[in-house]
Image (spheres, helix red, strand yellow):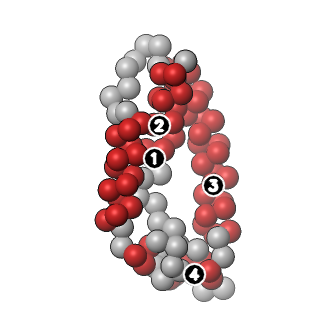
Amino acid sequence: SLAQIEYAAEVAMEHFLGLTCDPVNGYVQIPCIERNAIASIHSYSAYLFSKDISPYRKNKVSFDNVIQAMKETGTELPSDLKETSLGGLAKIIHC
């Protein structure tokens, strides 16, 4: 149902709010590609969760709420953590 789809999308996305994009040595493999692989597994788990729980529990956070929070978080995140390789993991790991 549409309610299950929204629930799954919200659950999957809310746990990725505020993550940095800090490619090590300028390459997107670490952590971006690895993170996307984990996110695909996380998304499938969110689907399984929503499929079983949404008929019994109304979601308190909407997908629109998560998108709004993601935009605000992205706006407030320092530029060093936005795919510049100047902060986060990229600053700590030198290849």
Horizontal and vertical percent position of residue 61:
35, 33
Q: Position of residue 93 (x, y in %)?
A: 57, 81
For the point 37% across and 20% down, the residue is: 58
Mark 4 lies on a secondary structure that is loop
Residue that label 2 marks: 11
Q: Distance between the residues labelled 3 and 4?
A: 20 Å
Which residue type does callout 4 highlight?
Answer: Ile
Badge 4 density bin: few <14, some 14–19, many ≥20, Cα 10 Å: few
Q: Which residue is denoted by mark 3 in the rendering?
A: 36
Q: Earlier in the sequence, mark 3 or mark 4?
A: 3
Instruction: Inspect the image, locate mark 3, and give the three-letter code of the amino acid beneath it.
Output: Asn
Q: Earlier in the sequence, mark 1 or mark 3?
A: 1
Locate residue 18, reporting x and y percent. 41, 58
Quadrant occupied by the C terminus: bottom right
Residue extending furthest toward the top: 56
Is residue 89 at least partly visible in the picture? no
Give yes or no for contact between labels 1 and 2 (Cβ–Cβ under 8 Å): yes
- Residue matched to label 4: 93
Nearest to N terminus: mark 1 or mark 4: 1
The crowd level at tag 3 (other Cα within 10 Å; few <14, some 14-19, many 20+) is few
Residue 43 visible in the picture:
yes
Q: Distance between the residues labelled 2 and 3?
A: 16 Å
Nearer the observer, disc 3 or disc 4? Answer: 3
Task: Classify mark 2: residues with Cα within 10 Å, few (<14), some (14-19) or many (20+).
Answer: many
According to the image, label 1 marks what residue? 15
Q: What residue type is labelled 1?
A: His
Q: Do the residues labelled 1 and 4 touch (CB within 8 Å)?
A: no
Mark 2: secondary structure: helix
